[in-house]
Amino acid sequence: MTTTARSSLLLHMPRPCGLLLMACLSVSAVDDPLPDQLSVMEMSHWSKAEQALGLTLQGLANRKHAQVWVADDGMQAAILDDLHKAGTRLLSVASPWDVLPLFSPRPKGVLYRADNGGLPIAISLCAIHQAVAIEESLQADAAAHGVEIAIDARTWDDARLWREHQRDFARGIIVEQDPAKSGHLLDLAIARGAYTTYGRDDAAMTARVRDLGPDTIVYGWGSDEHQIITRVSVGGGTYAPADWSRNLSALQHLRITIPEPPAPLPLVPLHAGERVVAFVMSDGDNLQFLGGPFLTSAGHWGSPLRGQFTMTWEMQPLLATVAPRILAKLYAGAHRGAIMDDVITGPSGAGYCFPAALPSRQHFAEITATHLKASHLHLVSVLNSGGDLTQTSELLEQPDVLGVIYKDYESYNAKHGALWWHQGKPCLSYRFLLWEGLAGQNPEAVAAAIGELPASPLTDPASYILINVHAWSYRQNGGPMAAVQRTIALLPAQTRVVSATEMIMQMRQHFGTPVVQP
């Protein structure tokens, strides 16, 4: 873009909007113009302090347009290559200081000390004051490059930050990022004016989510999965695992028309004596994986086995607004037809949360429905803790929701294939897992157990079997896709492998409200 980014600590930034990104970032019906050029930062050899500086500069430069990119592999490299082929000029940046010419006047600095956990506070102050993060070790370099220190944050703590600036932060977003990951995600916090934190206790984090709500999304990750999801859910928010994400500040401005994902062919009649099986890859809520190695990983989307059997993939619907080119690229490359790449939401819809802990499941269901439309998804995956299948009723009541697939936090198949119907739509829980190291959840054991189940799909819902494929298992044995292939080869005769979407449609056809196909 030719527009010059402007930054000044003396100019007070108006409070940004934030409701699930939708208020600021709508899904475009027309592709956005591509940037004329991108400054591409090669950060692999930078110090942590230089990486943090680089991301604050990136976030400021990308507040209105995509101007700065961080070089990376996987999906990031593929999208950058697409942009280059479409005409965007790429300028290599060897040092964070080389980005400064994009700004007039030069941004001011927030001084912090890394060894006292001061980076999140510095990022928060940079986000609201349009400044850049200067670690003590870079103070002399900053002066040499004309960056004046405006705030010394070395004595600040989170209590003071919140007391003095609560009203200045964008609503609807929090970034929770380990200070050790200074080269990832922080650009989004700067671009969106977000409160950034790490290691808050449960009560404090729940209060922050409520204060910045409604519908706060927390981007990043913490130290204990169950703890961080619970405390955010209780506050009415959701989580988007994103702590290793890059370039979200740029990707949010690279809107593109998102194609429809693969749809099942007209339903093929089932027969007595058959069992119906669907394999679903887990962890589709994971923004950083979908936006990183997922595309090229030999155990996942990049597997040479993809297209040899039908596979269902969880997908993060928030991508439609925060990084639409990622979603568009995956949909465009999906297999269609009799053997297909089926796509459903990651848990638990519009971000990862535990429905049992939400203050309003109705409100969450309505927000999820909005994101389903943007991402063209219809089948919702739910991951719950301390609850049951009936807590998906609000989701099932949404007109565009085809059904719900249910898993418990521990273990995913704790409900052993239990089924619950609401308004003619099913909520079906996982029967089996492909999870390395768990007893009875390997290809051989799962295939043998399927042979003991009913084979009457026209009269017995127990003939429909969901298998969750753990995304991080079998890394030394071909990856999870190889585990699926092994399982399929061992399945008993007259077992039909279908997509999860087709499975739910078949169940509705025979036991609930039939789906009208085009």
Image (cartoon, rainbow, N blue to C red):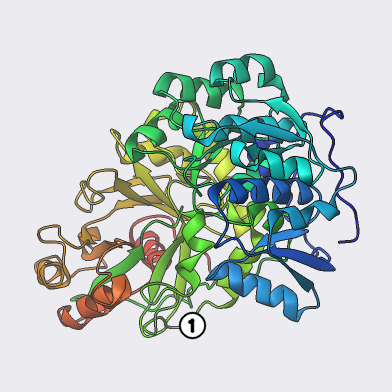
Q: Position of residue 303 (x, y in %)?
A: 39, 79
Please report the residue visible at 28 percent of the width from the left and 33 percent of the height from the top. 386
Q: How many numbered marks appear?
A: 1
Q: In the visual, does 290 lie left or right of 129?
A: left
Provide the residue designation for mark 1. 337
Please report the residue visible at 51 percent of the width from the left and 49 percent of the height from the top. 242
Q: In the visual, does 392 lie left or right of 364?
A: left
Question: In which quadrant of the rendered image does the N terminus lie?
Answer: bottom right
Asked which secondary structure carries label 1, the reply is loop
Instruction: Identify residue type, mark 1.
Output: Gly
Residue 349 in view, yes or no: yes
Q: In the visual, does 420 lie left or right of 202?
A: left
**Along the line of sight, which residue is nearer the eye, 24 or 465?**
24
**Along the line of sight, which residue is nearer the eye, 85 or 97?**
97
Q: In the visual, does 353 lie left or right of 494?
A: right
Q: Position of residue 50 (x, y in %)?
A: 61, 50
Q: Could you classify mark 1 by the number of other residues whose Cα lies within 10 Å: few (under 14), some (14-19), or many (20 or more)? A: few
Question: In which quadrant of the rendered image does the C terminus lie?
Answer: bottom right
Q: Is residue 500 above or below residue 161?
A: below
Quarter-wise, where is residue 6 in the image? top right
Quarter-wise, where is residue 260 in the image? bottom right
Residue 518 in view, yes or no: no
Q: Position of residue 473 (x, y in %)?
A: 26, 64
Q: Is residue 189 above or below residue 502?
A: above
Q: Is residue 22 above or below residue 319?
A: above
Q: Position of residue 424 (x, y in %)?
A: 41, 50
